[in-house]
Amino acid sequence: MNDQMMNQPKHWLHLLPTLQTDSHKYSRGYVFIEGGYPMTGAARLAAVAAARVGAGITVLAVPEIAFQIYASQLLSIIVKPYANAATLAQLVDDERINAYLIGPGAGISEHTRSSTLDLLRTGKPVVIDADALTAFAEQPQTLADAVKGPCVLTPHAGEFAKLTGHTIAATQTLKIAQAQAAARTFNATLLLKGAVSIIASADGRILLNNNAPPTLATAGAGDVLAGLITGLLAQGMPAFEATAAACWMHGSAATLFGPGLIAEDLSPMLPAVLRTLASQANH
């Protein structure tokens, strides 16, 4: 592998958010995540990760039926219930929001499709993950046409095949070409997740992330990664660099924890990872 293509802090460390003496919770970034039901764990994992990576406020918008489940398990994350599409739209339209995430535990439905399109209409950064990707399997052009601002798509191989109609190629060179083509098609940063993840931008840039240990092959790890990306976007990082930084932190947190990892273990490792990065930035 070309060393220049490997995802390393040198590619994005200078863009990592830094706290200022006059920072406050709104200036640190406002993350909005749409939470699903009955799969409630995924969005909660993402929300905690977004907060851990520095977002000043993280809000979960959830169906009323799920409010008690979410609210009883979260303290620093704000949970806002919605009764229907109109009340959800009011939450989405909060001008203070800096970045959105949809997909973890969302379910593959017309509601997920329409919600994704509503988020994209804001023109603010949007991370589209998991079920929100598969929801457009029959309508990829609808998704592509809707992208108006910074956008990150985070498919694994199966989701990529459903969204693009192309099975992942056998060779790294062809996989990279596929990721680049999809990034151009959707005018988005595309994270093709795998043992070596491919981060592709719409303008042709590529980074390969190879610091993910096999312990990350566990339920919920991808939801944490989506939350990390969203948290960095909310703090002003560009989409390509935010995705690369989140991938690197994700792998580093897993390596730091070691054997026995489950998804809940990743976010508590982030402070140590961030301290290491801050030390590198100061030298």
Image (cartoon, rainbow, N blue to C red):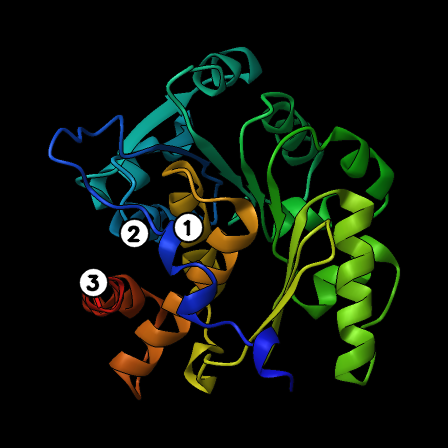
Taking the spot 58% from the left edge, 50% from the top edge, the residue there is 129
The residue positioned 40% from the left and 68% from the top of the image is 9
Above or below, 156 against 182 in this view is below
Q: Quadrant of residue 263?
A: bottom left
Q: Pointer 1: residues within 10 angstroms few (<14), some, or many (20+)?
A: many
Q: Quadrant of the C terminus?
A: bottom left
Image quadrant containing the N terminus: bottom right
Closest to the observer: 179 or 137? 179
Residue at 51%, 49% (x, y): give it. 104
Mark 3–mark 1 CB contact (< 8 Å): no
Q: In the rendered view, would you say 251 is above or below 130?
A: below
Q: Amino acid at mark 1?
A: Gly
Q: How many C-alpha atoms fall within 10 Å of the one at disc 2: few (<14), some, or many (≥20)?
A: many
- Marks 3/1: CA distance? 26 Å
Residue linked to disc 2: 53
- Which circle's residue, 2 or 1, is located before the other in the chain? 2
Of tags 2 and 3, the one toward the viewer is 3
Name the kind of residue labelled 3 in the image.
Asn
Q: CA distance from mark 2 to mark 3?
A: 19 Å
Residue 18 x, y percent position in the rendering:
25, 46
Q: Please indicate, yes or no, whether residue 179 appears anywhere in the rendered image.
A: yes
**Which mark identifies residue 282?**
3
Where's residue 15, x and y in %?
39, 50
Q: Quadrant of residue 281?
A: bottom left
Coordinates of residue 153 in the picture (x, y in percent) = 64, 50
Give the residue pinned by disc 1. 227
